[in-house]
Image: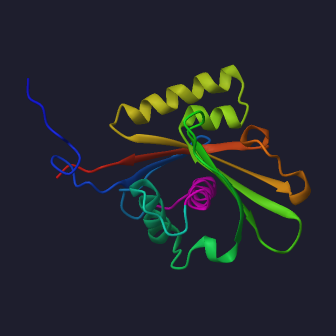
């Protein structure tokens, strides 16, 4: 038996966003000259909004770096909006949602990311859609990727629920992150 600590020993200890999946589109972000379809861009933008504006977490840093590189976001999406509320990650629900106000109306933007099964639960997906999602997740995971689900929504300020589960969210895609080998 050979035991090793892979993080930082066998890998670079630097998360990288490698794949984005949205609807029937997927993008390998290591491909040269990649042109991203609009639905892939929407997944990435919402993943950024579901992350801290100045992230410490390696996955969130990887999401921000991908946004800078692929969407030309030299300034953060966060600077255009005001954080209104956060539904934090809990041991019972491995997902986070951030609610943003543009200041123009009472409409708020909701961005969520987390474990695919947690995001599926928040989106109240049907059993059939959850099964097809599990296949997509397994395909990414079989490549050695860490997989996150992404969802979004809009809500009026007056309708903002107390409970995370009561948000009205739409499942929009998956992220596949890797820690590259040395």
Rendering quarter of residue 142: top left
Taking depth in this image into account, of 140 and 62 the one nearest to the observer is 62
Residue 156 at x, y percent in the picture? 88, 57
Residue 36 at x, y percent in the picture? 53, 59
- In percent of the image, x 68 and y 20: which residue is there? 127
Residue 59 on the magenta segment: no
Residue 13 at x, y percent in the picture? 26, 54
Please give the range of residues in magenta.
Answer: 34-51
Q: Magenta part mainly helix, strand or loop? A: helix
Q: Quadrant of the N terminus?
A: top left
**85 displayed left or right of 18:** right
- In percent of the image, x 44 and y 70: which residue is there? 69
Q: Is residue 32 above or below residue 144?
A: below
**104 displayed left or right of 25:** right
- In percent of the image, x 85 and y 74: which residue is there? 104
Residue 126 at x, y percent in the picture? 72, 24
């Amino acid at each position: 038996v050979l035991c090793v600590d892979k993080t930082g020993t066998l890998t670079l200890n630097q998360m990288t966003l490698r794949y984005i999946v949205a609807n029937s589109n997927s993008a390998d972000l290591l491909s040269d000259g990649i042109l991203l379809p609009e639905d892939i861009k929407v997944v990435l933008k919402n993943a950024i909004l579901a992350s801290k504006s100045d992230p410490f977490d390696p996955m969130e840093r990887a999401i921000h770096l991908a946004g800078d590189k692929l969407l030309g976001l030299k300034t953060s999406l966060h600077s255009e909006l005001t954080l209104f509320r956060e539904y934090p990650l809990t041991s019972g629900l491995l997902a986070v949602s951030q609610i943003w106000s543009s200041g123009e109306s009472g409409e708020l933007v909701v961005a969520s990311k987390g474990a695919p099964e947690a995001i599926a639960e928040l989106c109240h997906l049907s059993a059939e859609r959850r099964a097809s999602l599990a296949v997509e997740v397994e395909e990414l995971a079989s490549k050695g990727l860490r997989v996150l689900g992404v969802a979004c929504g809009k809500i009026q300020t007056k309708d903002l629920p107390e409970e995370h589960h009561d948000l009205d969210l739409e499942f929009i895609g998956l992220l596949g992150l890797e820690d590259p080998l040395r």
